[in-house]
Each structure stands twice: as C-alpha cells, then as structure tokens.
Image (spheres, rainbow, N blue to C red):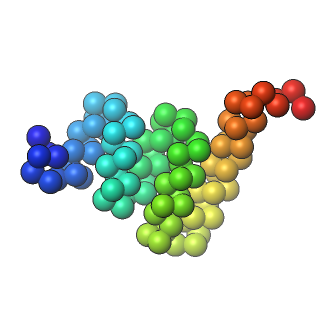
Amino acid sequence: MYLNIGNKKSAAECYYILKEYNKAADLFVEIGEFTRSIECLDLLEDWSRVLEVINILKPKMTFKQREMYIKRYAPLALEELVANVGLSGI
C-alpha cells in the first residue's frame, strides 16, 4: 500500500516489522538510509551485500562511518567468501 502512494520509507519500515529484511534493505537503500539497510543485512548475515551498500551509499556517509562499517564487515565478508570457495582449511 505504501509503495503505491510512493512512501518508500513507510513501506521499508513495514517490511522490517514483518521481518522481510531483503525487501526492507532494498527500500532503505533507495531512500538513502544506509544505517537501516545495513541493520537489515546484518540480521540476514549478508556481509557481501553490506559492503555493496557501503559502496553505493558512500556519498551519504562520513569517512569515519565508512571506515567503521568496513572494519566491521569486510572481515566477515571475506570469511564468508573463503567458506563459499572451500578454502576454509587453509
């Protein structure tokens, strides 16, 4: 309903409440709310998408914010990538 009237923020909040975090994260990115988008992706443990959001919305972040998020999520994304490639025993 909110999407039909162009209220993406309210739609994103509804998706968040319904625990549809992928949809909520996408809408939060569209409206430039990186904190909420990252929060949704954190709940999903989708670390690579967190890095994508950081890259997409970097103009909206301060250098310190970007640095904080990268320090927190880059190691998790790398760990996820290594596990997916099958190199975890190295």
Quadrant including the N terminus = top left
How many discs appear? Answer: 0
Q: Position of residue 84 (x, y in %)?
A: 70, 30
Q: At 63% across and 64% down in the image, what residue appears?
A: 67
Q: At 67% across and 42% down in the image, what residue appears?
A: 76
Q: At 63% across and 57% down in the image, what residue appears?
A: 70
The quadrant holding residue 86 is top right
- 2 displayed left or right of 32: left
- 26 displayed left or right of 61: left
Q: Position of residue 85 (x, y in %)?
A: 74, 31
Q: Position of residue 47 (x, y in %)?
A: 58, 42
Quadrant including the C terminus = top right
The quadrant holding residue 23 is top left
Q: At 28% across and 37% down in the image, what residue appears?
A: 15
* Residue furthest to the right: 90
* Residue furthest to the front: 85
Q: Nearer the viewer, residue 68 or 45?
A: 45
- 64 displayed left or right of 23: right
Q: Position of residue 22 (x, y in %)?
A: 39, 37
